[in-house]
Image (cartoon, coloured by chain):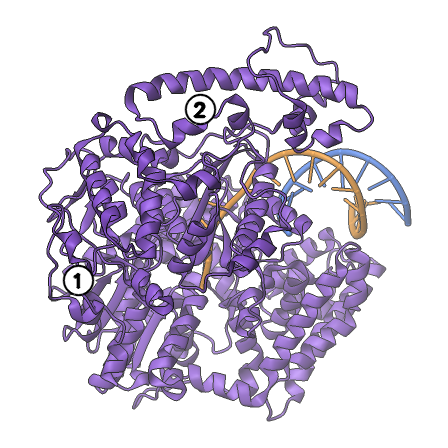
Chain colours: A purple, B orange, C blue
Amino acid sequence: MASDILKGLNRAQREAVTSEANVVQVLAPPGSGKTKTLTARVAYLLAHRQLQPWNIIVCTFTVKAASEMKERIRGFVGDECAKQLKLGTFHSIALRYLKQYGTHIGLQKDFGLADTADSRAIVKRIVKQNELSMDANQARSKISSQKAKGIDAEEFARTRKNAEQQEFSQIYQEYQAMLDASNLLDYDDLLLRCCVLLRTKRECVKNVQALLIDEFQDTNTIQYDLMSLFAQERNVITIVGDPDQSIYGFRSAEIKNLSRMKEGWPDTLTINLEENYRSSGAILHAAQHIIEQDESRPAKKLQATHTFGLRPILRKLPHAQAEAEWLVSEVKRLQALTGNMLQKSDFAVLLRSAALSRVIETALGQAGVPYRMVGGARFYDRVEIKLLLDYLRVIDTPGNSEALERIINVPARRVGEATVKALAEEARIKGSTLWSHVEAVAQGRRRSRAKINEPAMLGLRKFVGIVLGGRKKIEAAADGPVPVVDILTLVIKKLSFEKYLSEHYKEDHETRWSNVEELLAQATEASDPARLQSLIEESTLPDIDDLEQVAVSAKDDALSFFLANIALTASSAEKAEKDGEQAQQLTISTIHAAKGLEWPVVFIPACYDGSIPHSRAEDHDEERRLLYVGMTRAQAVLFLSSPQRNSQREEAVLSTFLAQSGVSSFFEEHGPSIAMTEVTGLAITLRRERPTPAKLAECKKGLDTDEDNHWPVTGELPLAELAKWDYGNSGGQATRPAAVFSSASITMQQLSDFPGATAAAAPGFTSLKIKYEEAKEELTLAQMDRRAQQAKMLETEKPKGRKRQMEGQGTIASFFGKPALSKQTSSTTSLESTAAVNASDMPPGFKRSRQALQEVDNVRTIRPEVELERQNLLQHKVRTAPLLRQKSVISTEHSVPAAGYMFLSNFPPRPEDAEISSSATMLPFEEEDTENYGHARPATTLHTTSMQRVAPQRKTLGMRRSLHGWSARGGKG
DNA sequence: GTGACGGTCTTTTTT
DNA sequence: AGACCGTCAC
């Protein structure tokens, strides 16, 4: 058993899992096996400390993380045991305690949850009613952040006294009063009240033997308090986290909690995981470079275990639509050129904000690429679903006036704004809830002082009838569980919902109706007595002696259970995944929602100032971390891109994080050329079967172009579109540029090579041709200017090589955005071309690595991945050289020149290749780690530090063995 | 006065 | 996709 738990763990991970310390902090950078470690620790505690699963609490931040964790633990300890763990998001665990023990702090047992829409509506109304100047949304988020600090309305009122705060204090208090009156808790209340509960009744957690927390860097103050309280009996705590991935500052996350924890528990053991098992070296390097721009950040080690791989791409495109189209074309190109080794589900588009998805969704839709959207517009937020859920919520919690107001006139039943306002006001004066007032008025038991006209009254009665019909179903359920489906079906029927949808949403009513059907399916599932029972058992907390506990019953709580689950749960996408529909879909997600996940290919579009860092963001360091998190989701290929104009057609400037000097040396300007070498490399990194040449050739057929060469790398428009965009509006009367274009004349052959040229030859050719040539002239002149300047600069500092070669191919090639290196060149590159690099132009480290390179080349048989790396290095050497000058790559123990690292450090020789290590640049292996790797592990830890450190005195060139590279190779020989 | 509807502008991130 | 505003019909 123990061996099972520890299998496949490296030394640091193993230490974290088996540590006898009570309080353990595991600092785990991206891809370092964080979840693996945490789940193994749970299994280890169960097996070796004989803890009972129901006495262990595991907290995650997202539902997705919770279900993944559960799945993994199940693998260790089996289904039965995993089920008994108290595992879930902070909010869902807090909810369990409040449901069962909430009466001890004066909560009603049937409280409902106020979602974001509810609380926003409440605050808005308070602001309006009192004619306050404060922005409602601001007030809401301020309430949230106060609650996250554990400050409730009363406490705030006691301590703050200036005018502005007074006003906010009033809002806060009224808001809380409103929630109380409606018998609702908001998200923050779940945590806040749970803290109150555990402070007053600490017996509730008397049984807790161990607490584990995922993504600890995202805890806020109240969650920290909750942690202390959960663990108060035994103080056995394991947390995993990474300060570099703290991206929830807006939700009041406190990175300081890490150090605060060390103060609170001085015996805290800290373990650093330092090896990245996810991303290629090139991606990791680039990501590291970005995160290290944050100077306040303590330097940290992070080692690649993969080969260097393909350099990430930083692509300029003219505008947001072009960016989306380019993205789609790169997806298609990569798929085709890898012989479908990459599937749609291997691609993810990660966005700073969900709203950016629109353009991309359109482009994907037009190209017929199926996709799913995670985060952003969630299933339960769709209007049609929200509407139905609001009906259920009102039936469940009649005090929920916000939900009631949203649905009272939807579908329209002539109960207008004015009527509702009058009714709400009357209810407020009477001190009753909106629902009881409306009910009384509709039933004629009470007369509204405002005149309600006949149609409005009829509508009101109809509405009340529906809600009462639902409630009747609950009462009629006698002993059995409440049939949630029946209630939902009733509502749908009474509303003639299908008809309503088809009338109201002519375009897409079918999709909407299928969403409704999906909801029905979920309700059916939730109504299944056996399933319900097991769910309830799972969420029930263990009995504590002498402590009164409200039993959760299938009868009373089926509906609230269903709704609470939905409020605290995931989107439909997750659902689909759970159902095993691992569909061939590309993923679109916000970066936030992508945390903890990984994909072979990742796109991060819209990398411009205002998007990332976001214009509203106060903390740019957090925005930088966000980019870092996004980048480190990628395993093999990473595309960053930025349009020159944003979706509002305003000028967009490249993100400051990417515009810093030195950054560009980590990126290519366009998508990679993909030949056999690259396919092999990808196959190794992803540990997949390499497609056969026949398959490759076949897949390639459907492709228009096998290079990323439609859009110029400069971010300018392709010529054909230039005519459209720049001249389209002026009625074709373009003025001829003053300068005369003379250098390279374009042959007809070249013209017809150019996409769009055939279209130009159609009717209307003459005028189009003129425009085309004018455009071409202008563009070329501009480009020649720029390139001349660049060339001048390059001449002085850059050795001749790949980049220069490309530019040397002449204006036309670069003009059309042709790739820097044709496949032919790349696959035949040899050391001869290295000779073209002027050695005196190179920094010393680079020279040495070249020497090492030659030595490797002399080895009789070269392993395929070494050959691959060699070619990579040759391709990238020119880019690497300036990098060396700008930034030293320093190791704590040993120093390694970057180029050498990129190449050699990833592929240390096997013992049988001993002749290589006779080179002066090689370092003997340490033996200690042989057991983990099956072979020697290098002594070097590569570690980039900030720029003030000067080029190192190189002691030794450390070697690094690629775990994944080897094992992948082992499989195929 | 009401209610319905269509066009325009603005969009952070999440439990 | 939602909020907001102006316009039109009853």
**Residue at image x 23%, y 63%?**
A26
| Element marked by disc 2 | helix
Q: Could you tell whether A771 is left or right of A914 in the image?
A: right
Assess disc 1: are there few (<14), some (14-19) or many (≥20) residues with their C-alpha within 10 Å of its C-alpha. Answer: few
User: Which residue type does callout 1 highlight?
Assistant: Pro
Q: Is residue A286 visible?
A: no
**CB atoms at circles 2 and 1 under 8 Å apart?**
no
Residue topped by disc 1? A911
Residue closest to the eye, A522 or A652: A652
**Residue at image x 48%, y 47%?**
A674
Mark closer to the chain start, 2 or 1: 2
**Residue at image x 17%, y 42%?**
A890
| Residue A663 placement (x, y as % from top left) | 34, 35
Q: Is residue A246 above or below residue A718?
A: below
Residue closest to the eye, A168 or A45: A45
**Residue at image x 73%, y 59%?**
A409
* Number of dots carrying numbers: 2
| Element marked by disc 1 | helix
User: Which residue type does callout 2 highlight?
Assistant: Gly
| Residue A246 placement (x, y as % from top left) | 33, 52
Identify the disc placed on residue A808. Answer: 2
